[in-house]
Image (cartoon, rainbow, N blue to C red):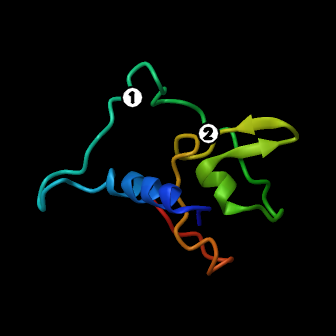
Amino acid sequence: LVDDHLSAIAEALDWLSFVPDVKGNPPPVLDIRGIDVVDRPIEFCPVPGQPYDPRMLMNGGYVDGKWLSGLFDRDTFKETMAGWAKTVVAGR
């Protein structure tokens, strides 16, 4: 959720930026050359038998003050049901 109407509009526009402009077109793809390395290591690794937050595996996060990367680019995973289903992680 957001704090005001302007932030809500910005979030809606961000969400729509992942949708094709015309039905049947492919989704838009950003040119990330020079911004992000495609073949990078996934630094967060769950310890077998230890509980962990699956959001860390997808999005990455800080562990002991150090950023550990996840499966997705940093800050790109948008969780859609965070306020409703605490044990289910759904998003894009």
Q: Secondary structure at mark 1?
A: loop
Displayed quadrant of residue 28? top left
Give the residue at x 61% y 39%: 42
Give the residue at x 39% y 28%: 32
Q: Position of residue 46 (x, y in %)?
A: 74, 53
Classify 10 Å Cα crowding around label 2: few (below 14), some (14-19), many (20 and above): some
Q: How many marks?
A: 2
Q: Secondary structure at mark 2?
A: loop
Residue 38 falls left or right of residue 84: left
* Residue to which mark 2 is pinned: 42
User: What is the CA distance from the residue labelled 1 to the residue labelled 2?
Assistant: 18 Å
Mark 1 / mark 2, whichever is N-terminal: 1
Is 84 rendered above or below residue 8? below
* Residue to which mark 1 is pinned: 32
Is 31 rendered above or below residue 79? above
Give the residue at x 68% y 77%: 86
Residue 40 falls left or right of residue 23: right
Q: Amino acid at mark 1?
A: Ile
Q: Position of residue 47 (x, y in %)?
A: 79, 54
Displayed quadrant of residue 9? bottom left
**64 or 80, nearer to the observer:** 80
Quarter of the image for the C terminus: give it. Answer: bottom left
Dot label at residue 17: none
Classify 10 Å Cα crowding around label 1: few (below 14), some (14-19), many (20 and above): few
Q: Nearer the viewer, mark 1 or mark 2?
A: 1
Residue 51 falls left or right of residue 72: right
Residue 63 falls left or right of residue 16: right
Is 20 rendered above or below residue 63? below
